[in-house]
Amino acid sequence: AQKVTQAQTEISVVEKEDVTLDCVYETRDTTYYLFWYKQPPSGELVFLIRRNSFDEQNEISGRYSWNFQKSTSSFNFTITASQVVDSAVYFCALNYFQETSGSRLTFGEGTQLTVNP
Amino acid sequence: DAGVTQSPTHLIKTRGQHVTLRCSPISGHKSVSWYQQVLGQGPQFIFQYYEKEERGRGNFPDRFSARQFPNYSSELNVNALLLGDSALYLCASSLVGTGNSPLHFGNGTRLTVT
């Protein structure tokens, strides 16, 4: 069975602080994909990043960076110099795919990030 | 290009009624998936369709059904509505139906069952 755990339910920071959102996953698959999505109050889930299980390189995109560590089954997300517009719920997700049962995402419970001015 | 569009945006129904939710994928995307998101929780997988065929079904009762049309749009139907069906229903599309293709989500339909 697949499982994604986001232990931080809510995080509150002051603008310009750095913040890290934790994600731990469980899977028996050797090939899998991990994702981060952002959900602003409007409800739409916005795709941020995809990482496959064979690529452990960290990635940086502007103020966003991701640290994938297969040894600890973690895929953490860091926002540098946070801004008020970063306030949203962030979801970590693990993809499950089989020819017989299709493709589906297993989401964590989400972390509500509030960035105060 | 337009993103994933869902209709209606909000819906209020009474217990026992049925509901149809609609979704248009991003142009060129052949896979459509449906997710249910109860307030305060992460989305839960309901269905995946690819090339008009059901490829996967989540742990939902038979009251939930869906289909995909030749133009790749999709409908989600829920019969005999229960209070517990109140949720945000999200549709997502992807280029192909495999794990490496990111899902692109619509704004969702917020269903309230009274």
Image (tube, rainbow, N blue to C red):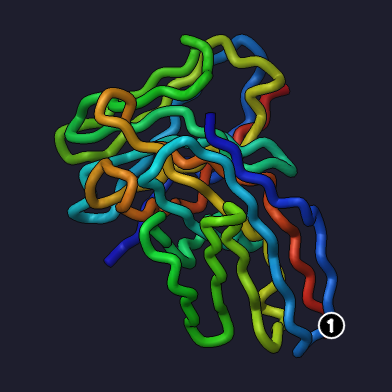
**Chain letter, disc 1 residue:** A
**Residue drawn at (69%, 61%), measured in percent from left and top?**
A22
Q: Is residue B10 visible?
A: no
In the image, is A43 to the left or to the right of B45?
right
Given residues B10 and B64, the one toward you in this image is B64
Q: Is residue A57 visible?
A: yes
Q: Which residue is mark 1?
A: A14
- Across and down, in percent, residue B67 comes to 30, 25
At label 1, the amino acid type is: Val
- Determine which quarter of the picture holds residue B3: bottom left
- Determine which quarter of the picture holds residue B66: top left
Given residues A74 and B21, the one toward you in this image is A74
- Across and down, in percent, residue A77 comes to 61, 69
- Across and down, in percent, residue B23 comes to 37, 41
Q: Secondary structure at mark 1?
A: strand
**Residue drawn at (31%, 52%), measured in percent from left and top?**
B100
**Residue drawn at (63%, 24%), measured in percent from left and top?**
B85
**Residue drawn at (44%, 26%), measured in percent from left and top?**
B20
- Above or below residue A81? Residue B92 is above
Locate the C terminus of chain A by quadrant.
bottom right
- Mark 1 crowd level (few <14, some 14–19, many ≥20, 10 Å Cα): some
- Across and down, in percent, residue B64 comes to 47, 17
Given residues B72 and B20, the one toward you in this image is B72
